[in-house]
Image: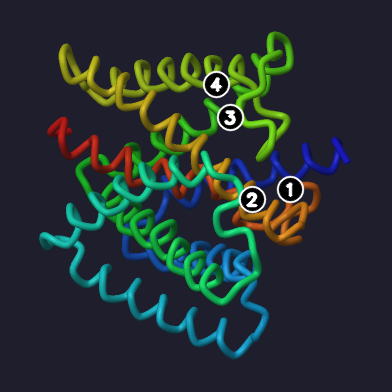
């Protein structure tokens, strides 16, 4: 299993770099849209929506919304959607404190989780467009993804060697507070070096480092929320697309939470 996970990761990393750094936004956007929509399909499954025609209809609606927000990306809709994304992830923190909330397989809870899925995916899509289409946008998008990846690696090693106190044992028993601190350090270092290479100076660079820590917090919340959904659905993975890594949602949960936070912070910092 470890070899399978390692080989999959080694394949995915260069593909992700190529997707972010090589194409213009007009090519980047539809590819990312497909990835996000597949993840949304998996979210609908975790929500308990079993009827395939209903899932297809909702995916078609999501596709229309993606196209609409792409068309209006340079309007006031972008900061509005980023603000909605920030508000949603703050609200998600309250959900994580109540593990049983929404757990029962009722129609009301199904509707709640489907609505939550729209708040997870749509602001992240707008954030990806906002970052990639900005000045030096390829590199800003890459930096955002690198912060999340570095935080994940930092959390793994610090949690493995120093982790004792559990972060959220009911939701994700493997996560520890030591892992969180390691994620903060790794994400901040990447932001410091990346910001310097992008020409960010003085107060803005300090602001970027602080933003990276908030972004890491959001990525952890995103990971925990998907773990909560899987616990409610009593499944191990959201899908089986990647051998040893589960589905697309398993790979993107942290990214969905991190992108709107990072993009909103970048706008506030004037970067």
> Which dot, 2 or 4, sits closer to the camera?
4
Residue at image mark 4: 180
> Which dot, 1 or 4, sits closer to the camera?
4
The quadrant of the picture occupied by the C terminus is top left
User: On screen, 204 above or below 19?
Assistant: above
For the residue labelled by badge 3, is the local secondary structure a helix, a strand or a loop? Answer: helix
Please state the horizontal and vertical placement of residue 140, each as a whole percent of the image.
32, 38
Pointers 2 and 4 in contact (C-beta within 8 Å): no
Pointers 3 and 2 in contact (C-beta within 8 Å): no
> Which dot, 4 or 3, sits closer to the camera?
4
Q: CA distance from mark 1 to mark 4?
A: 21 Å
The quadrant of the picture occupied by the N terminus is top right
Residue at image mark 2: 250
Disc assigned to residue 219: none
Please state the horizontal and vertical placement of residue 104, each as a whole percent of the image.
64, 64
User: On screen, 188 above or below 89?
Assistant: above
Query: Residue at 73% of width from left, 54% of height from top?
Result: 237
Residue at image mark 1: 245
Pointers 3 and 1 in contact (C-beta within 8 Å): no
């Amino acid at each position: 299993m470890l070899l399978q996970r390692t080989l999959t990761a080694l394949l995915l990393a260069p593909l992700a770099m190529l997707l972010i750094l090589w194409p213009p936004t007009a090519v980047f956007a539809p590819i990312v849209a497909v990835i996000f929509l597949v993840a949304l399909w998996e979210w609908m499954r975790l929500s308990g929506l079993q009827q395939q025609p209903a899932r297809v209809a909702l995916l078609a609606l999501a596709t229309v919304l993606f196209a609409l927000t792409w068309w209006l990306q340079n309007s006031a809709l972008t900061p509005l959607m980023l603000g909605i994304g920030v508000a949603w992830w703050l609200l998600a923190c309250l959900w994580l404190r109540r593990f049983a909330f929404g757990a029962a397989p009722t129609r009301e809870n199904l509707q709640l989780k489907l609505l939550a899925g729209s708040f997870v995916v749509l602001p992240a899509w707008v954030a990806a467009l906002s970052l990639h289409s900005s000045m030096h946008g390829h590199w800003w998008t890459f930096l955002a993804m690198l912060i999340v990846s570095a935080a994940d690696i930092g959390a793994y090693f610090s949690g493995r060697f120093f982790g004792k106190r559990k972060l959220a044992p009911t939701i994700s028993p493997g996560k520890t507070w030591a892992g969180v601190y390691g994620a903060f350090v790794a994400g901040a270092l990447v932001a410091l070096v990346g910001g310097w290479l992008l020409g960010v100076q003085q107060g803005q660079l300090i602001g970027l480092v602080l933003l990276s820590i908030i972004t890491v917090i959001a990525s952890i919340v995103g990971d925990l929320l998907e773990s909560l959904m899987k616990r409610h659905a009593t499944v191990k993975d959201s899908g089986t697309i990647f051998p040893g890594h589960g589905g697309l949602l398993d790979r993107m949960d942290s990214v969905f939470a991190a992108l709107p936070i990072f993009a909103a912070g970048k706008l506030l910092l004037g970067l």
